[in-house]
């Protein structure tokens, strides 16, 4: 498909994803690396309580809070 036809389909609100090979697509600066952190039990309990209150998994709240803190420490 030519680029102008693809642009027109997209502009018309039609699906275009099937024309791309996304099997090797990556999000810039979003690569993941697994880390292991040992936390005291009281901290895990408080994390679980906050996560339950917000209706999200523990891992999600940890990532959000870490991201917020890192944003604050950026110059």
Image (cartoon, helix red, strand yellow):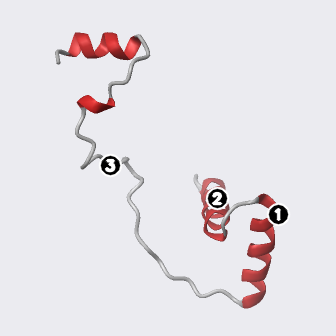
Q: Give above or below for 26 relative to 8.
A: below
Q: CA distance from mark 2 to mark 1?
A: 15 Å
In-image side of 31 versus 52 (left or right): left
Q: Which mark is residue 26?
A: 3
Disc 2 residue crowd, few under 14, some 14–19, many 20+, Cα 10 Å: few
What residue is drawn where x is 21% and y is 16%? 3
Q: Which residue is mark 2?
A: 64
Percent from the top left, x then y, of residue 23?
25, 48
Secondary structure beneath disc 2? helix
- Look at discs 2 and 1 and give the one toward the viewer: 1
Disc 3 to disc 2: CB gap under 8 Å? no
Which numbered disc flags the more N-terminal residue, 3 or 2?
3
In-image side of 36 versus 5 (left or right): right
Disc 2 to disc 1: CB gap under 8 Å? no
Disc 3 residue crowd, few under 14, some 14–19, many 20+, Cα 10 Å: few
Secondary structure beneath disc 3? loop
- The quarter of the picture where residue 20 lies is top left
Percent from the top left, x then y, of residue 62?
64, 67
Which numbered disc flags the more N-terminal residue, 2 or 1?
1
Observer-nearest of 35 and 2: 2
- The quarter of the picture where residue 1 lies is top left
- The quarter of the picture where residue 31 lies is bottom left
Q: CA distance from mark 3 to mark 1?
A: 33 Å
Q: Which mark is residue 53?
A: 1
Observer-nearest of 45 and 6: 6
């Amino acid at each position: 498909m030519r680029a102008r036809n693809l642009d027109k389909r997209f502009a018309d609100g039609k699906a275009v994803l099937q024309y791309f090979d996304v099997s090797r697509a990556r999000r810039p600066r979003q690569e993941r690396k697994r880390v292991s952190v040992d936390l005291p039990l009281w901290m895990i309990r408080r994390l679980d309580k906050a996560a339950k209150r917000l209706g999200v998994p523990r891992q999600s709240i940890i990532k959000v809070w870490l991201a917020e803190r890192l944003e604050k420490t950026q110059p």
